Image (tube, grey):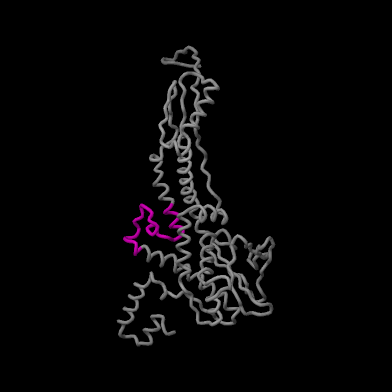
Amino acid sequence: MNWTWPFRKAAAETKSAWPLIALSEPRAASWGSREPSALIRDGYLKNAVAYRCVRMVAEAASSIPLRTSHEGAARLLRQPNPDMAPVSFLEALFTDLLLTGNAFAEAVRMPGEDRVLALYPLKTATMRPVKDTRGWVEGWAIKAAGRERTVRRDADGWSAVLQVKFYNPLDDGMGLAPLAAARRALDLHNAGADWAKSLIDNSAKPSGALVYSGGRMAPDQFDRLKEELAANFAGAANAGRPLLLEGGLQWQALSLSPAEMDFLDTRAAAAREIALALGVPPMLLGLPGDNTYANYREANSAFWRMTVLPLASRLSEALSRWLDAPFGEDVIVAPDLDQVPALSAEREALWTRIDGASFLTAEEKRRFAGVGE
């Protein structure tokens, strides 16, 4: 019952609601999966920022030569297998490590021999950990050509499969992908691109409704109005075309405009989060709004020191421990930092300080400089 001031019953009033022609409606936010295959699909294959960051880190890390004094290990590093150059082999491992949090390689040996003949990278999507009753990984199941084979540790505990991974607090077997932490930023950036593409393809259907004030619209008029909207205002060719209203029609906006949503700033912030998760200073990608470093040279130096070198050291240390058993002695594999052009200024400064140390002998200076060993 209707009431009016001051507390007296008002006469019943019958009104018909204005029909609304809804052109769009809001949806609940949905976030993508953190599974490695989903991260590769939505990140490396669909997102330019993630793709470029992974390529930058993997190419930089694989460009650093690995050195060792062991003849057998040096031969493997010069030619991991007949089909791949050293840079390609290392780039495959670094790319998988960045995308999935894991990198796998398999050592090929002749039956009955311990000598390693070749090293092959293995894709993370084909790997499944085989665990014992205590939950420890005792082998790996590898899918290939529709079949699965299992590689287990030998009697001495050595495995022909090497795993390099990022620490994962939720899983003892598989590592955590950097893009998993930036999953929401990745979704925001991709959704922004989808939104822009949809706006171009269907620019005549902004979020809102047409309000008809002339009572109830006839069904044939309703269908004709929808057809005219689709024919005359949808598509890239009609982008920006004004919407002419007549016959009691009024436009009622139902959502915020891109400017009100701070749309461009949201995409830029998401791009910076993706870059930071992968260890690339946003300044190196030309992303707006990043003033972390004073100049490009400082950002590039931080990129090598904080991202590339730790990644190269992680892999070289893993190779060192892994190759000890098949060669029967300690194998030391280390990145050759003297071959990194980005660190030439720091290397020259180090040599200058060593050369000026008058209390050191010539042999000690050579040892501190890492030459003549």
* Magenta span contains residue 273: yes
Residue extending farthest front: 237
Which x, y percent locates residue 239?
43, 37
Instruction: Give the residue at x 36% y 52%.
Output: 288
Which x, y percent locates residue 109?
64, 76
* Above-or-below relation of 116 to 14: below
The image quarter containing residue 142 is bottom right
Residue 320 in sight: no
The image quarter containing residue 258 is top left
Instruction: Give the residue at x 52% y 76%.
Output: 78
Which part of the image, by quadrant, shows the C terminus?
Answer: bottom left
* Magenta span contains residue 34: no
Residue 231 in sight: yes
Residue extending farthest top: 11
Instruction: Give the residue at x 41% y 44%.
Output: 263
Residue 257 in the figure: left or right of residue 329: left
The image quarter containing residue 169 is bottom right
* Above-or-below relation of 291 to 58: above
Which x, y percent locates residue 298?
34, 64
* Above-or-below relation of 184 to 119: above
The segment highlighted magenta reads 271-298
